[in-house]
Image: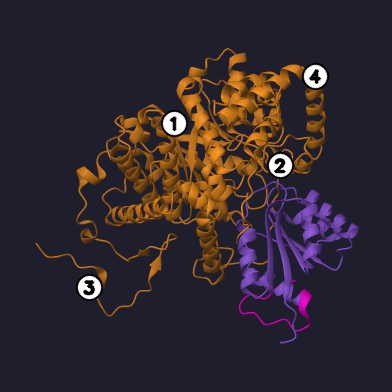
């Protein structure tokens, strides 16, 4: 006893083991031991689940009390078809749905806009132009029990207005509405690139919706601060962790600067992470995120409500990890990724379908994706014990290392003027493009093996049936929209437009005029045009 | 070797989709291989693409489409290329474009479509073979299957 534990290299200094790095570039040793977590204190640094600093999970009983939200995509081009899809998913046992928008809606353009040609209802997204579309999308769906996650960003204020007016029509009090609006504009400039206006007015719109939800929709998550898209664009898991938290702290600061008490809005801030192929790196990323968030909210932002310290996260398996070669292998990849998200303590999970490298999913591939989660939840027994990897020398050491590296990056962003300045000077875009290129190089030179792609390839591929998009939908949607637009009261519409532009100019919250606007039949594209006339447009410098 | 003309390639993302990871990786790989890359970036209309191709006198246009709108976008670009007589320019593409759409796009005039997972060296080799001369520089690793 009392022997100092030896590392594997000390035991046999002559043995050469090839060094390995994880996706974040951190060197992974062949073996970890007590010497790797010597300074770690269980009480101070890890703690029990549901207790500060929440490394082991944000709730005391986690999945023993309630399994994570099994959340799949309920969107398809036509709003009425998406509605059927939502009902079907609920029947099949999904406990949450995400609604993606089609590209024209994402870019703030109505289905009859010339730029929308060929893109209406595609890309697995639903086309939302007007209140009629929101009515069709959510008809018969119980808004008080089904949690709807709107994958909506630049257009969030308008989607929120449509959602609230619909609830009002149906007699559901806003105070009972559940769900989430993605509404994370900062990552749009960094990665997903669906912005309309310059960063500052966009950030202000996000804060308007957070303030409106704070006053009126206390059960609704007005933002889901997203690392997923950063990682899809190429960010490493470490960059995803650091950039997402840097963005989150920016929203917190904006909220405080706008006069809100930190504990009044921080409990409703939620997150969205990706899980990629590296199992333990995923787990360490979530555990590190919970500790950084809890400590920063408590120590830096002086939040006193424990709800403000909890890093609540939705997770999606990695779309960018899916291969178009030997596509069935993606079922296995998705399963391993999903398992890591569960072991990491996610609150909600979306599993991708195996054919998404080439197309939107078919009913078969969607079913397998949903059943994957149910098998993990009910057959694998991994949900029986909370944070089962706690105390693992490796996982705790990696959690510490991811945390330390992320804090270093967050500080560097601060030192460079903060997130908005770093968007404007291209820092994020360059960092992410650099990582994307490095990943591609590692795959191409065989350093990173992707089964079926750069190893064990088979040449000729078996045919897999892909989903077809209804070719007539676009024409029909445009005709219906034109009809809708010709049946409105022009004076009410004009007054609403004027009020909206006025609010944009004066800095008043845009939600009240948007609510009046959509009631008067204002379309999403029209609302964006009014806002653009005040805020202007934004174009990033094209760099690669 | 010394008389070889530098290949000029325009890379762009047409339409509304913002997933530019692939386009940027390809732009970087072509640039590293010694080509002159004009990277137009996001949200380009067919008009912007074809006008720039004419102004910049490029040898090839590469378009990345992940939105499913490829069967609309490529024919629009091709008809504008014909209209503006930008017809000595090679048009190629990549993204999430299922194989069953390739025959249609090729018949329309898209010279080559690259699938997800393509090695960037294959794209370099393709452009060098198609554009430079009959003696493309030898690349290591994967051989092009075309």
Contact between labelled residues 4 and 3, with CB atoms less than 8 Å apart = no
The lab-note entry on whether marks 2 and 1 share a chain reads: yes
Work out whether A146 lies above or below A124.
above
Query: Which x, y percent locates residue A367?
Result: 59, 40
Magenta segment boundaries in residue numbering: B130-146
- Find chain A in the image and tell me its colour: orange
Mark drawn on residue A122: 2
Q: Which residue is mark 1?
A: A258
Query: Which x, y percent locates residue B104?
Result: 83, 55
- Left or right of B6: which side holds A264? left
Residue at the top extreme of this rendering: A171
Mark drawn on residue A136: none
Q: Quadrant of the N terminus of chain A?
A: bottom left
Q: Which residue is mark 3?
A: A10
Tell me the quarter of the picture where residue A517 sits: top right
- Left or right of A479: which side holds A102? left
* Magenta segment includes B137: yes
Categorize mark 4 by other alpha carbons within 10 Å: few (<14), some (14-19), many (20+).
Answer: few
Categorize mark 2 by other alpha carbons within 10 Å: few (<14), some (14-19), many (20+).
Answer: many
Which element carries disc 4, helix, strand or loop? loop
> Looking at the image, is mark 3 or mark 4 earlier in the sequence?
3
Camera-side residue: A268 or A423? A423
Marks 3 and 2 sit apart, C-alpha to C-alpha, by 58 Å
Q: Which residue is mark 4?
A: A487
Categorize mark 3 by other alpha carbons within 10 Å: few (<14), some (14-19), many (20+).
Answer: few
- Find chain B in the image and tell me its colour: purple
The residue at 41%/43% (across/down) is: A342
Residue A496 seen by the camera: yes
* Mark 4 or mark 2, whichever is nearer to me: 4
Tell me the quarter of the picture where residue A365 sits: top right
């Amino acid at each position: 006893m009392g022997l100092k534990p030896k590392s594997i290299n000390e035991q046999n200094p002559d043995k050469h083991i090839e060094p390995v790095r994880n996706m974040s570039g951190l060197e992974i040793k062949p073996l970890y031991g007590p010497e790797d977590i010597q300074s770690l204190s269980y009480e101070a640094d890890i703690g029990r689940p549901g207790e500060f600093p929440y490394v082991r999970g944000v709730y005391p009983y986690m999945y023993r009390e309630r399994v994570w939200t099994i959340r799949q995509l309920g969107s398809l081009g036509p709003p009425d078809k998406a509605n059927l899809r939502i009902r079907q998913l609920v029947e099949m046992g999904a406990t949450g749905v995400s609604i993606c928008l089609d590209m024209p809606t994402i870019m703030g353009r109505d289905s009859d806009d010339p730029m929308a040609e060929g893109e209406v209802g595609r890309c697995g997204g639903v086309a939302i132009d007007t209140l009629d579309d929101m009515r069709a999308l959510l008809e018969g769906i119980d808004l008080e029990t089904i949690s709807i996650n709107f994958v909506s960003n630049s257009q969030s204020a308008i989607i929120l207005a449509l959602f609230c007016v619909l609830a009002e029509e149906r007699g559901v009090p806003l105070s009972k509405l559940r769900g989430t609006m993605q509404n994370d504009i900062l990552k749009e400039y960094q990665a997903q690139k669906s912005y309309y206006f310059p960063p500052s007015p966009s950030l202000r719109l996000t804060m308007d919706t957070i303030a409106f939800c704070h006053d009126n929709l206390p059960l609704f998550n007005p933002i889901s601060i997203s690392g997923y898209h950063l990682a899809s664009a190429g960010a490493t898991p470490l960059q995803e962790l650091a950039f997402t938290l840097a963005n989150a702290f920016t929203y917190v600061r904006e909220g405080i600067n706008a006069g809100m008490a930190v504990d009044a809005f921080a409990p409703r801030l939620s997150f969205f992470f990706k899980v990629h192929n590296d199992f333990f790196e995923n787990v360490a990323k979530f555990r590190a995120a919970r500790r950084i968030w809890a400590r920063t909210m408590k120590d830096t932002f002086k939040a006193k409500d424990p709800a403000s310290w909890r890093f609540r996260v939705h997770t999606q398996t990695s779309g960018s990890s899916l291969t178009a070669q030997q596509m069935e292998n993606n079922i296995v990849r998705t399963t391993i990724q999903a398992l890591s998200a569960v072991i990491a303590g996610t609150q909600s999970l979306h599993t991708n379908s195996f054919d998404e490298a080439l197309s939107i999913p078919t009913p078969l591939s969607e079913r397998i994706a949903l059943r994957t989660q149910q098998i993990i939840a009910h057959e694998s027994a991994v949900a029986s014990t909370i944070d089962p990897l706690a105390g693992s020398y490796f996982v705790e050491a990696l959690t510490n290392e991811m945390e330390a590296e992320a804090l270093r990056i967050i500080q560097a962003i601060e030192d460079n003027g903060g997130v908005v300045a770093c968007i404007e000077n291209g820092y994020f875009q360059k960092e992410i493009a650099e990582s994307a290129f490095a990943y591609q190089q590692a795959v191409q030179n065989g350093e990173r093996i992707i089964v079926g792609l750069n190893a064990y390839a088979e040449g000729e591929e078996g045919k897999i049936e892909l989903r077809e998009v209804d070719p007539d939908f676009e024409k029909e949607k445009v005709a219906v929209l034109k009809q809708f637009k010709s049946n409105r009261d022009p004076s009410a519409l004009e007054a609403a437009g004027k009020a909206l532009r006025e609010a944009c100019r004066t800095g008043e919250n845009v939600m009240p005029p948007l609510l009046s606007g959509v009631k008067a039949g204002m379309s999403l594209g029209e609302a964006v045009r009014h806002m653009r006339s005040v805020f202007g447009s934004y174009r990033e410098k094209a760099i690669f | 070797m010394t008389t070889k003309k530098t290949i000029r390639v325009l890379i762009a993302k047409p339409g509304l989709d913002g997933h530019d990871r692939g386009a940027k990786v390809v732009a970087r790989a072509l640039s590293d291989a010694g080509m002159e890359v004009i990277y137009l970036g996001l949200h380009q209309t067919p008009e912007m693409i074809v006008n720039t191709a004419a102004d910049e006198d490029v040898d090839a246009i590469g378009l990345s489409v992940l939105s499913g709108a490829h069967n609309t976008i490529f024919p629009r670009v091709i008809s504008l290329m014909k209209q503006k007589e930008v017809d000595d320019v090679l048009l190629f593409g990549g993204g999430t474009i299922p194989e069953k759409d390739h025959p249609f796009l090729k018949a329309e005039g898209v010279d080559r479509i690259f699938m997800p997972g393509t090695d960037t060296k294959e794209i370099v080799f393709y452009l060098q073979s198609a554009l430079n001369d009959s003696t493309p520089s030898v690349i290591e690793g994967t051989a092009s299957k075309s």
